[in-house]
Image (cartoon, grey):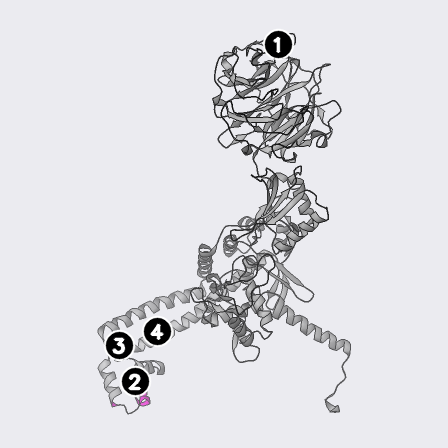
Amino acid sequence: MADNLRSVSIEQEMSTSFMDYAMSVIISRALPDVRDGLKPVQRRILTTLHDLGLTHTKAFRKCAKICGDVSGNYHPHGEAVVYPALARLAQDFSLRALLVDGQGNFGSVDGDPPAAMRYTEARMTELAENLLVDIDKETVDFVPNYDNTRTEPAVLPARVPNLLLNGSTGIAVGMATNIPPHNLGELVDALILLLDDEKTPPEKILRAMPGPDFPTGGIIYGKKGIRDYYATGRGQLQLRAKAVLEVDARTGRQTIVVTEIPYALNKARLIERIAELVRDQKIREISDIRDESDRKGMRIVMELKRDAVGGAVLNQLYKHTQMQMTFGVILLALVNNQPRVMGIQDMMVHFLRFRREVVLRRSRYELRKAEERAHILEGYRIALDKIDRVIALIRKSRTAEAARDGLMANFGLSQIQAQAILEMRLQRLTGLEREKIEEEYAELQKAIAHLRRVLVERALQTQIIKDEILEIKKKFADPRRTEIVDETGEISLEDMIVEEDMAVTISNTGYIKRNAISLYRSQRRGGKGVIGMGTKEEDFVEALFIASTHDYLLIFTSKGRCHWLKVHEIPQAGRAARGKAIVNLLQIGPGESVSAVLAVRKFEPDRYIVMATRQGVLKKVELTSFSHPRAGGIIAISLDQGDELIGVGQTDGTREVFIGTRLGKALRFPEAKVRPMGRTARGVRGISLGKGDYVVGMEIVAPGEVILTATEMGFGKRSPVDDYRVTNRGGKGVINMKVTQKNGPVVGVRRVADEDEIMLVTTKGQMIRLPAKGVRLIGRATQGVRLIDLHEGDKVAALGRIEENGNGAVPEGK
């Protein structure tokens, strides 16, 4: 006994044993092979499915049977290890292209575990069969299994670029791999480029395959991380959930709807995290969260409180939850059983070289089989040419061995040919069968010639590889799911906000809100309207305008200052709500109120802003002068004592200016009569006003257009612009509307088209929307017709226009 004992240093033994363990984990468990993209357990599962004949056209088999065979024949680590690996191959939220077709519960994106293996069933997908195609043609090496009772493939022939298609995640000893999935169609396009030239520039590869394509979709922000891992095998990707801001048609409140989440994120835990943030009051603006996901897709809905700004809440969610996360890419795989980090181009080249090896080994196998068959057919041809002598020799022979030897000696046949002739059925002696032998022999000669060419001509090998992967693309490629945004800086909220038109209202006491245009039903002339804003007796709607959620607002105040605000930053509220105090959104000074608002999409050159004041002063400024307002606002126009800004319009410099006054006067003159001025200038005389009169509106017009005028008592009319003669600026103007006690003073003038709609807002908060063409087109010097039936003591406070351009309503002033 003592002779069998030997002393070993514990440090040496621990080092040796740990290295053996580490290499076993690296090679036999945690890392995929660069050729077929599979870990050993995944390869053994697919091999077992192939052994059982479970192709995509065959019936499903119980997973308990499959896992038992995998564990018993190839993978002796127990079914508890095999079944989770099998289930993952059937999860459409884990794999970009499924390798196992599962029937039953195989888990969910919420982290639910698969049902017990005795309940679930599986078989291969058609795509998975392309990983095993030609495996019986000596295309790959087979090695003994764990107990030497059978052999298993060391790698699968893999006609599909599975490693980059489905990616891989694994933690070994001292290293880890994290390979993202990619789009099959794009991947094949990139492989084609490398087939033609292994030194294809990385820029071409990036154009063919822009980046990862995760099964759960989502958004990748910035291409730096993609370029990094394409080049070096390591990179950081910024993933975001795909979310949009919507309006609840029932409540009118804003909601955040998440339809796609980052890869490998547990949806249930995400919802729990959001609920925890709301409970801890770290996010206060969410009033309710619910999961409306179903078989059709994911839908996480978060209802916001009345005054919440959706974009700001979304930013908080990205900051505090895994709705935004980093995906660290490590392209680590086994190359010749050695772990290696490589760039994506190297990884593709390894796959293509492997495919070339498979094509060569398959061709050698098929050539050998073809030559063996041709050898037998040559024997048949010799025997059929001398059939009588062959039959006589066989009849005279006492034994089969004697007959075989006689055939070999008398006809020059090999042992294989002689044995095949002895085993040939008599029916092969017919004329028809002789023709079939000749045809088969001719086809074999062609096949042999082709296979010999394949073995020596590299271009032909390349074409075969190209044809095979293009066939894979044709059958299995689908559209990209993950959006890639080429931005590295701050992400614009507009990308996540649904673009729609909003009715923005501002009260005289300084409250602002927005509502979707769709919430206001279009009515016939003379209707009562619907509540558009809840107001106190002393609080009435003073301004109404229409703008897109993606627009910027230039907000001009009564003191001639300009502030900058995005429409989606304005809180959304119900029709009857007051909204939010504008002083909480803008730095407006004491005694200052909002007097005009302009919606702008882009600050382009050769565009101008025309301003009109209450006392008839007019000013024209280049639009670019307002592209960067400061937090406290900037000077838009210098006003005289007691004057205030009442109207703003945007123009290209070639139009006409139309000014309307409270007592029914109007003046039309060419815009060219007003030269552009500096931002702080006073302006020039636009219209000469009579005693007690002041300007109520200014429009930018062109010949052939129509002006709509509305009065305090709810009357209005349309008149052609051409009815107003063109004069010089500074004149007194002509009669626009006969102002009487019945119809009241003018409250607004608007340029309208037949397809437009208008909105009237009253001092008590009622709003009515009606088609412009429903207002009678009559002469300018008239009292107009009734537009709205007012309640006692109510008056019209504002007139707004909804302009149509074929794509739905767009903001006025565009």
Q: Distance between the residues labelled 1 and 4?
A: 106 Å
From the top left corner, tell me how far across and down residue 460 is, in percent.
44, 60
Q: Distance between the residues labelled 4 and 3?
A: 16 Å
Task: Classify mark 2: residues with Cα within 10 Å, few (<14), some (14-19) or many (20+).
Answer: many
The residue shown at (35%, 66%) is 446
Identify the amino acid type marked 4.
Ala
Task: Specify whether residue 407 is painted magenta.
Answer: yes
Residue 264 seen in the current view: yes
Residue that carries the numbered disc 4 in the rendered image: 374
- The N terminus lies in quadrant: bottom right
Point out the frontmost of discs 1 and 3: 1
Q: In the visual, does 605 lie left or right of 704? A: right
The answer to which of 59 and 761 lies nearer the viewer is 761
Identify the amino acid type marked 1.
Gly
**Circles 1 and 4 in contact, beta carbons < 8 Å:** no
Task: Classify mark 3: residues with Cα within 10 Å, few (<14), some (14-19) or many (20+).
Answer: some
Residue that carries the numbered disc 3 in the rendered image: 428
Residue that carries the numbered disc 2 in the rendered image: 407
Mark 4 residue element: helix
Identify the amino acid type marked 3.
Arg
Task: Classify mark 4: residues with Cα within 10 Å, few (<14), some (14-19) or many (20+).
Answer: many
The earlier-in-sequence mark between 1 and 4 is 4
The earlier-in-sequence mark between 3 and 2 is 2
Point out the frontmost of discs 4 and 3: 3
The residue shown at (29%, 69%) is 439
Q: Distance between the residues labelled 2 and 1?
A: 124 Å
The answer to which of 668 and 236 lies nearer the viewer is 668
Mark 3 residue element: helix
Bounds of the magenta segment:
396-411
- The C terminus lies in quadrant: top right
User: Is the residue 356 above or below the residue 625 in the image?
Assistant: below
The label on residue 730 is 1
